[in-house]
Amino acid sequence: MSRRLPWAAMARMTGRRTLAAVPVLLGVTLAVFAVAAASPFDPVKAYAGTAGLTASQENLDQLRANLGVDRPWPAQWWDWLTRALQGDLGDSGVMRQPVADVVAERLGWSALLAATAFLVAIALGTGLGVLAGRRRGGLLDRAVSSLAYTLEAAPAFWLGLLAVWFFALKLGALPAGGLTDTASDTVTAGQVATHLVLPALVLGISQLPWFFLYVRQGVGDALEEDPVRGARARGLSERTVLTGHALRSGLLPVLTLVGSRVPELITGALLVETVFSWPGIAAATVQTAVSADFPLLAALTVLATAAVLLGNLLSDLLYGLADPRVGFDG
């Protein structure tokens, strides 16, 4: 019975969070349509392109009616919402294809980039944090901590431009952007892996300081606690003390950090995908926002919001599993 209780509590928490997410997502889509309607960008002119500069007002009005943007934005939002609940996300004016196709074509590439970058940030941040936390104030701790504070203030797009200049232009070791080589007509795993290195490293390094600082602080504090001192007094090896006692309690704060960094990861991906011409969701968001493409902008915003909510839920579930004292019913 005791084994079933955590899973039942996790299911209850997941259900509560799912119900609470519904009004949040509805409010987000409503805000998207309101903000897009108030923006100075005209979706009709963005759709028409250069032809809109010479088109008559009558033609522009007809195009506005065809696109469905001639009505008040609440009516547009309601029409989009009712169709979306039936599985129809509408058509993207700027991409000239259904919104579902745009998302399907780009979501996988964004997920690949974000997952790889997150693994880089967690692995490097945790490893360096443990080494620095073991001897706070040492040479490694001072050097890596200084670098971490510097990276905290460095914008992701600046790191991306610096990486392109050094690794692609100066050294010629890695491609500057894109998904495949310029002369290639096919997408191969090898080319994708090569082109993924720079954007994943830049995005991962931009998130690394927080993981490093949290682990460093957690491990350092855990090594000064009485249970760890008692373990050392019993003659246990330093490796056993670190892995069996300090590391577990020191890594608990990282579990909550996983969810809280999702918004920053999305923001960073927006910049990194643009710098490296990575064909993901984030790169399309900029063009969509400028063009006031209501259906696609709403869908992309819902995806980003859902990712943030899912990240927060995941971090809470992981923390509850790692520390039973926290529980899942709070």
Image (cartoon, rainbow, N blue to C red):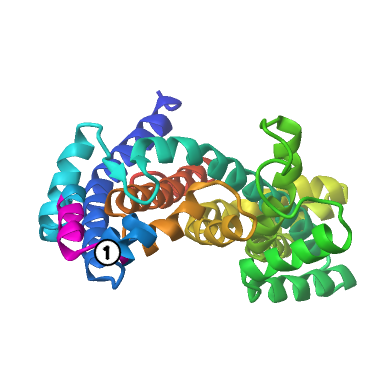
**Local secondary structure at mark 1:** helix
- Residue 100 in picture, x, y percent from top left: 36, 36
- Residue 278 in picture, x, y percent from top left: 60, 49
Q: In the visual, does 329 lie left or right of 179?
A: left
Q: Is residue 104 above or below residue 175?
A: above
Q: In the visual, does 297 lie left or right of 167?
A: left
- Residue 71 in picture, x, y percent from top left: 10, 57
Q: Nearer the viewer, residue 209 or 189?
A: 189
Q: Is residue 236 visible?
A: no
Q: Nearer the viewer, residue 312 or 56?
A: 56
Q: Nearer the viewer, residue 139 or 309?
A: 309
| Amino acid on which the number 1 mark rests in the picture | Ala
Q: Is residue 187 above or below residue 60?
A: above
Most common secondary structure along the magenta stretch: helix
Q: Nearer the viewer, residue 89 or 220?
A: 89
| Residue farthest top in this picture | 1
Q: Is residue 268 visible?
A: yes
Specify start and end residues of the magenta stretch as a single range: 54-65
In the picture of the structure, the residue carrying the numbered disc 1 is 36
Which quarter of the figure is the N terminus placed in? Answer: top left
Q: In the visual, does 212 lie left or right of 165?
A: left
